[in-house]
Image (tube, grey):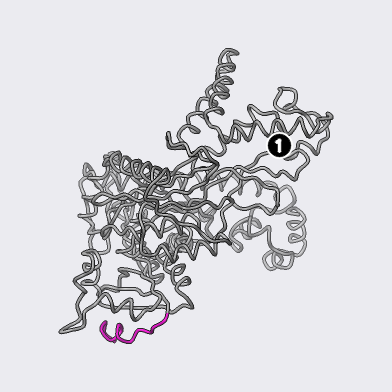
Amino acid sequence: MNLKESITNLPKSAGIYQYFDKNGKLLYIGKAKNLANRVKSYWLFTPVLRPNPTLSQRIINMLEQTTALNYIVVNSEHDALILENSLIKQLNPKYNILLRDDKTYPYIYIDNSQEYPRFGITRKIISSKEITYFGPYSIGARDILNSLYEIVKLVQKKGSLKSKKLCLYHQIGKCLGPCELPVTKQRYQEEINLATKLIKNKKLLLKELQKKMEFYAEELRFEEAAELRDRMDKINRSEIKSDIDFASSENFDIFVVAHVENRAAVVRIFMRHGKIISSSHDIVHLREGFDSNELYSRALLDFYKDEKPPIVAPILVAEAFEDLGLITKHLSRTFEKNANIIVPKRSKKKDLIDLALLNAKELLKKERKTRDEKIIQELQELCELEQTPYRVEVFDNSHMAGIATVGAMIVYENGKFDKKSYRTYHLQARDEYAQMRETLSRRIKSFSKSSPPDLWVLDGGATLLKLALEILDSNGVTLDVIAISKEKVDAKAHRAKGKAKDIIYTKEDVYRLQESDKRLQWVQRLRDEAHRCAITFHKKTKLKLDQESKLLSLHGISAAKIQKLLNHFGTFEALKMLSIEEISTVLSQKDAKIIKKFYN
């Protein structure tokens, strides 16, 4: 069936539709209340099928590349919205805007139903009727919490009351000691009230921390003073400064989007009790143009996800967008009450929007090109990459004679290594090819939670590159891949005078660049970081295995038997979960009982 026939035969049901190019690459995913009406609105059918000229240039460009159409029917427009968002995050289509913000933001809370309550941190609603929440905090939640316990004399640890004895915290003046002393609820409530006041008033909190820091400095306790200084700095950075005073206890979540030619900024500001308590932002690299509807929809869907937030506040946005009504319905389901999305035109609410837009524009100005940006654009041109590789994931595996086999993924974004996004994997596979298959397959399974990058880099040659492309293709994911390996002379990796003769492999070509070539050096730097990460994790894993092997040896299980077990079951972690009967398929019943007894 050709494209025109596919379009004319679409059902009038709710669903999602997908456009593909001549090579079968996914170009775009859209949703529709009525698939037939929505998709037909993109096209004119006479004298030949062609894009509707009233559409944006971005959409016209996409339609001109489209040669095939696929669709999935769902029960409602709401289901189409959820499916569309999920597939975009997993499959990374060329013409959709991908917002890689998969973070959840923490709240500080206190359970007032406890006899002597204490403050903690949560990211979800806690099943208790007497919980008070403060937040969300983009950064600094833990620093605020630690600061409270530095200043206020509350129960410091969950288990402190169980001991029924005074501990060190009471001795150093950081706890009233209700575990043993007759502390009245009224006296304890005074400390809770002070802590609540400090949470709500960061200026007061910082003032108290300043006093404490100066005290530590005078007492020559410089490490503690430096720790407080760093904590104050982090708390300071957690919010946007503003003179807007609501003189009320109103709560608002503010979302705005601003853009320049190839970048957009999404800014979120959170106002609680009439004061701005925190803010966050994301810079989005626009691959094929800007779409405010898509960015606002994605920002709201990704922030609230499918869970009711601990604090439900009215949402302020800078402009009306196409899916505003649909997003409102979705959030009403999520919040279990009517969601309120407002586009303010005047008053202090409009001042909040203007403040957020000002910060978004400033962020775009500050987002200068990194020193690597020119290099990665040249690499994109050389390797004919579909996307500029702003976010890159690099993979390597490590083992020693098949023992402690591990995989590692490092992440590079906007000129620096994003170490919080690094991942390591214990692997079952025995050979290099199967190990890389296992590592990449496990990463693809996590795309629904953490979206694909712009580029994969593999430590390996053409064979592993082909493997990665096959895995991506079988999962319907569009993603650029390159590989880098050392030049082999007489089947051995070649290094001349300490310099690596590395080769870059792409889908179409092989590049042997000069050692001084900045593009090669950039890829080498990423590969070396992945190698370092894999080796470090391998050593850690090997040390743990050696320790367990020694302990088993002391119980009469020889090294040869341990190796036999690992060859069959893969890891000690897997061995721990087995029954005596399962272990006895490899060793004797007696040995199996010893091993099971050891792990129990």
Residue 574 spot, x, y in % from top left:
63, 59
Side of 478 where 142 appears, left or right: right
x 36%, y 44%: residue: 354
Residue 158 spot, x, y in % from top left:
72, 40
Q: Is residue 11 magenta?
A: yes
Q: For the residue labelled by badge 1, is the local secondary structure a helix, a strand or a loop? A: loop
- Numbered range of the magenta stretch: 1-13
x 67%, y 42%: residue: 110
Q: Quadrant of the N terminus?
A: bottom left
Q: Nearer the viewer, residue 467 or 235?
A: 235
Q: Is residue 522 visible?
A: yes
Which residue corresponds to mark 1? 157
Side of 585 where 360 appears, left or right: left
| Placement of 217 over or under 547, stated as above or below | above
- Tell me where residue 479 sits by quadrant: bottom left
Q: Is residue 100 magenta?
A: no
Side of 131 where 26 appears, left or right: left
Residue 478 spot, x, y in % from top left:
34, 65
Going by the picture, which residue comes out furthest to the left?
47
Q: Quadrant of the C terminus?
A: bottom right
Side of 137 where 579 appears, left or right: right
| Placement of 48 over or under 543, stated as above or below | below
Q: Across the whole image, how many numbered discs are drawn on residues? A: 1
- Name the kind of residue labelled 1 in the image: Lys
Q: Nearer the viewer, residue 515 or 318?
A: 318
| Placement of 403 over or under 120, stated as above or below | below
| Placement of 36 over or under 165, stated as above or below | below
Residue 427 spot, x, y in % from top left:
52, 58
x 57%, y 34%: residue: 144
- Tell me where residue 363 sits by quadrant: top left
Q: Nearer the viewer, residue 297 or 22?
A: 297
